[in-house]
Image (spheres, grey):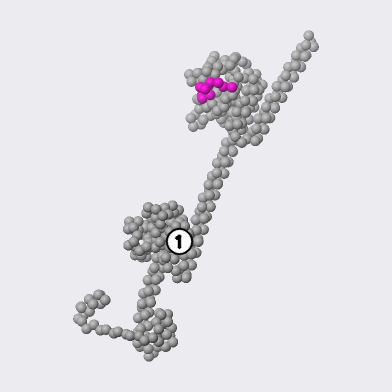
Amino acid sequence: ERAKLLALRVRAELDGRRRREAELSALFETAHDLAGLRDLDSVLPAIVQRARSLLGTDVAYLTLNDPARGDTYMRVTEGSVAARFQQLRLGMGEGLGGLVAQTARPYVTDDYFKDARFQHTGTIDAGVQDEGLVAILGVPLMLGPQVIGVLFAADRRARVFEREQIALLGSFAALAAAAIDSANLLTETRSALADLERANEIIRDRSGAIERASDVHDRLTELVLRGGGVHDVAAAVSQVLAGTVEFTEATAAPADPLEASRADGHAVRHGDDWIAAVTAGGELLGALVVRGHPGLDPVDQRTLERAAMVTSLLLLARRSAAEAEQRVRGELLDDLLDARDRDPRLLRERATRLHADLDATHVMLAARLDAPAADADLDGRLA
């Protein structure tokens, strides 16, 4: 009899050791899966499946808390056959799972429908009844002091869960919480990387726009220095903006957008075109028009506005040069008529700059108005 008792103790010890070995092996495999986490949707079902297998229960399932709605919902099930049960949502404190989520402590019941420790609701009880569950064990999923969900093991018959089984399910819950935390961190990292990539794209776009603006600045500066014209400016901006840019007289441009650009000082969109008024001292000199290019970004718009400013400077410079040339022509004529005290060499140099050939034969017409003063003023205005 003593030998029989010893043999039974040895057998029980060996069974316990084999069970703990299987449990440790399952925990190790789960930890290995967690270390190579790539997809939370594949890790969590593996945890629930192993928990069901080791505890030998009919069903195992996992719920997660929803902070936005203030409840907990079914996330993964293993062995479940009832659709209503798989779609359950439990309010905090409702049902056994709601109690676990609210108190952050494990709870076990031998007979769910006879247990009065937690709040029964019609929806939850109907789902549990559809699944045919009787004995249920629930342990919290913890991230620090925060409960993020509940891991369950349940049977369709009355059953007493041992302390070792409760501890084992708690170990699986810890791994599940770590898996969820790692997945969230991975998601946040991927989101941060995506944000950085978008930021880099924006920086690259801005850098390209700045390079284009710098290119326009260099080209316009070169045009001004070598005496280019307004159509040269339009051609240079056309190359940078990859569109057709034209200089038009004020009368040829659409009146409303031209006046809006003049008043605001910025380029104005008109249909598929952009119009930038060319002004100087409040005077409207014309317009730069970008044809068929509605998608100008702010940097390109600024480039068009800068080109309009350069165009106005060129027009003013040409006007000033023409006026100065006219004055110089008149002064040269006066000096030629009264050349006694003038240096002939200097007169020839001045004439050459004005494209006048002093060796050629010239005819000069002199006229005098003998009309009364009022009529002379009128004739002068008509001339």
Q: Quadrant of the N terminus?
A: top right
Instruction: Determine whether, in the image, residue 263 is placed left or right of residue 151.
Output: left
Under mark 1, the amino acid is: Val
Instruction: Say if 50 sits above or below 263 in the image.
Output: above
x and y percentages locating residue 50 in the rendered image:
64, 25
- Residue ranking furthest to the right: 3
| 304 vs 171, nearest the viewer | 304
Quadrant in the rendering for residue 354:
bottom left
Q: Which of 368 and 3 is in front in this view?
A: 368
Which residue is identified by label 1? 237
Count of numbered tags: 1
Up-down: is 245 above or below 48?
A: below
Tell me what residue is drawn at x 64 percent, y 20 percent.
56
Q: Position of residue 347 (x, y in %)?
A: 41, 85
Residue drawn at 66 percent across, 21 percent down: 164
**Quarter of the image holding residue 246?**
bottom left
Residue 194 on the magenta span: no
**Residue at screen point 50% across, 53% down:** 206
In the rendered image, the residue lying farthest to the top is 1
- What segment is highlighted magenta in the picture? 79-88
SS state under label 1: helix
Q: Is 80 colored magenta in this rendering?
A: yes
